[in-house]
Structures are given as structure tokens and as C-alpha cells.
Image: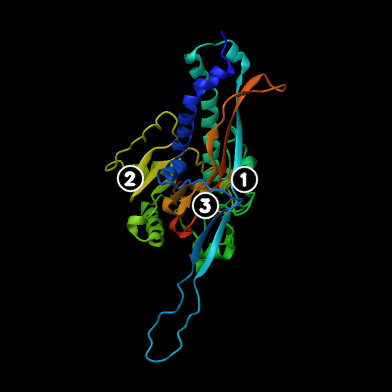
Amino acid sequence: MSISTELLNTTFADLRGPLVNAYVRSNELFDALQSKARMPMEGGTLIERSFSGGAPARGVGVYVGDELLNMTRRQQIKRFQVEPHRIVAAINIPKRELNQNSGKLAIIRLIEEYPQTVMEAAKADLNAYFLTGVSRGLVFNTSELKGFLTLNGNVSDGIGTGVTNGLLDFLTPAEQTTAGDVVQGVGKSTSISHFNQFADMSTTFSEATLRKVYRQCAHYAGGIGKGPDLVIMDDDTFTQFEAGKLSNVRVSIVEDKTENSNTIELSLGVAKTFSSIDLDRTSSGFSSPSSDAEKGVTYMLNTDYLEFPTLEAPTISEFQERVGDQDVVTAIFSMQGNMISTKLPAHGCVAGGNA
């Protein structure tokens, strides 16, 4: 007895939710944002957030008489804009497989073999693009993901409103102002506090440098207790970081991530610190303009000021029979949204740390 599409979908209905949940949870960025309800559902053609740049209005001072108050506004209200991007991936199961199998256990095996494999590969591609600006090419090639905002500020060929340049530049705040990259629709500038923190360790790993950037990020977020809560390193830099922590930090694998995770968790301040093999420092995304990013990459993110609003949350459709072109049944994985930061100085990046 073969497996019908109807029977396949009946069993798949109980597994679609867990598959999508595993997809989100195995991506350290999505997992952190979802745990703080930072992946809200929204509508519209643009994702928009406002921010205040510069110093407050100068209507406060010391006066002795009837002087005119100086009400010149120095504070500027600006609006970030990022275009939501949609991706779609087909999950195909050959009808031959359905004809040659029967029973619930066989269906579960097919789901593990086909949908789960596609979801894991899609997660790896998307994670790599967010971290490096270059896909691993397992399901999506790089050109298909260029509508998403990447963390890698070396990227300058994103497609869509607000995503041309990556979020975090491997440049000092002053150099970012000079370069004038437009991020989320606003030009980077120290005068309006639209820049990220940065330091360069070159070839020598320095935890003191990491702590300094962490403190700089925390300063703009309201204090040390409000510093970055998610730190992601390439594996070589993490190995250096780990070596100095083994005497007083317990290494742990996060719940439900043991099988499919590319991460290990330690701590820096109050931040969870991860190694991700999807953050490949040898990626072409780091080859220019900062060569030291090729020697190591550390991202420090404050998820209080980072969101991934969605017009369509990650979802998988039911399987349907294809007519004419392929002898398969097909389900569709899709999502639409984008990353956006509401306070860029609360985030930072560090280059280098390895020879």
C-alpha cells in the first residue's frame, strides 16, 4: 500500500510546527530575538523605526534674568527604513518514495529525509548570509539573499531599501562618518550617534579589547548591566576565547540544539557567547576593505535594539502534487521580513585575533 498525499499531510500536520520551531531555535540570532518577542508580525511595504540622533534641544541652561532661552534643536528625529525580503524554497518528495512505502513510521522517515534536510540547509544558508554576507549555497545562493540586511558592514551590494550596506562596519566611528555608508536609509555619522563600536586585535587575541568594546556598547545602551547579550565569534577566535575561560566557565550545549547546532555557548559579561561555523572568517565577504576581519570576527549584539519584524513568519505549507514538470509532491517553506537595528551604537564588532 502506497502513501497518499492526504495521509502524508495528515502526519506532516503534527510535525510542521516543530520543524519550523527547530529552524528558528537552531539559529542563534533568531532564537535570541524570538525569546524577547523581537520578531513581531507587521504589514506594509517598508519596516520603519524612528530614532533620536544628536544631543537634546538646548532649552536648558543657567539664566540670571530675562534672557531669551536658546531653543535651537540639536536633536534630530530620523527614520530607519528597511524593505522586507521574501524567500521561498521547495521541499520535494519523489512519488516513487510514496509508492514504495507505507505506514506512519515510513512517513516520519521521509519527513526526516526530505523536509528536515531542506530546513537545516536553508538555516545554514540564511545564518551564513546574516553573519558574512555570503550564502553557503545549499538551498539559496547569495544573490537570492541579498534583500536581507547582513551584519557584515563590508557588504555594499545588498538589494532593496535600507540594505545596500551591511550593519556593522569594521571601522572606527570616525572612519564610519568619513565613509558615510548609508545603513537602514540613514548615513552613518558620530554627530547623530549612528555608528557601531569597533576595535581591531590584528593577529593577537585580547580579551581586554573585547571587554572594552563591550563596555562601549553598554554605555550607549544605558550602562554595564544593559550591554550586548549575544556575542557571535568565528570558531578560531572562539577557541582563543575559550582557552582563557576553561578554568572558570562551564561549556554547555543549549537545550534541543545538540544534534543540529553549529554553536557552543560561553559567556562574556552578561552576554551568551557562541562559536558558529557559519561565521567563516575566510569568506569572501571579509576580504575587503578590512583585511583584519579575515583574521577573526566577533559580533556583539544587543537584542533590545535589534529586531526581525516579519510580514510572513517562517512557515511550511502542506504537500501538493506537481502537475507535468516533476513526478514529486511539493511543500513550500517561506518567510518574509528583515533585520533592523533601533540603536546602532549599542552593537559592535571586533576584527582579528588570529594569525
Q: Which residue is drawn at 67% across and 23% down?
A: 322
Mark 1: amino acid: Lys
Query: Marks 2 and 1: CB-CB under 8 Å?
Result: no
Task: Pinpoint residue 176: horizontal percent, then vertical percent.
Answer: 54, 62
Q: Residue 146 shows which numbered tag?
A: 1
Task: Return the residue at label 3.
Answer: 340
Inspect the image, locate mark 3, and give the three-letter code of the amino acid beneath it.
Ile
Residue at 49% x, 33% y: name it.
20
The image quarter containing residue 236 is top left
- Few, some or many C-alpha atoms within 10 Å of disc 3 (few <14, some 14-19, many ≥20)? many
Number of the front mark, 1 or 3: 3
Mark 3 lies on a secondary structure that is strand
Dot 2 or dot 1, earlier in sequence? 1
Q: Could you tell me residue 52's position as x and y percent?
A: 49, 65
- Camera-near label (2 vs 3) is 3
At x 41%, y 62%, the residue is: 220
What SS does tag 1 mark? loop
Residues under numbered marks 2 and 3 in contact, where contact means CB atoms less than 8 Å apart:
no
Could you tell me how far apart the alpha carbons at marks 1 and 3 are, in whole angstroms?
15 Å
**Tag 2 residue:** 244
With 26 as the anchor, is 115 left or right in this view? Answer: right
Query: Of the residues shown, which amino acid type is indicated by label 2?
Result: Gly
* Residue 152 sits above or below residue 179 on the image: above
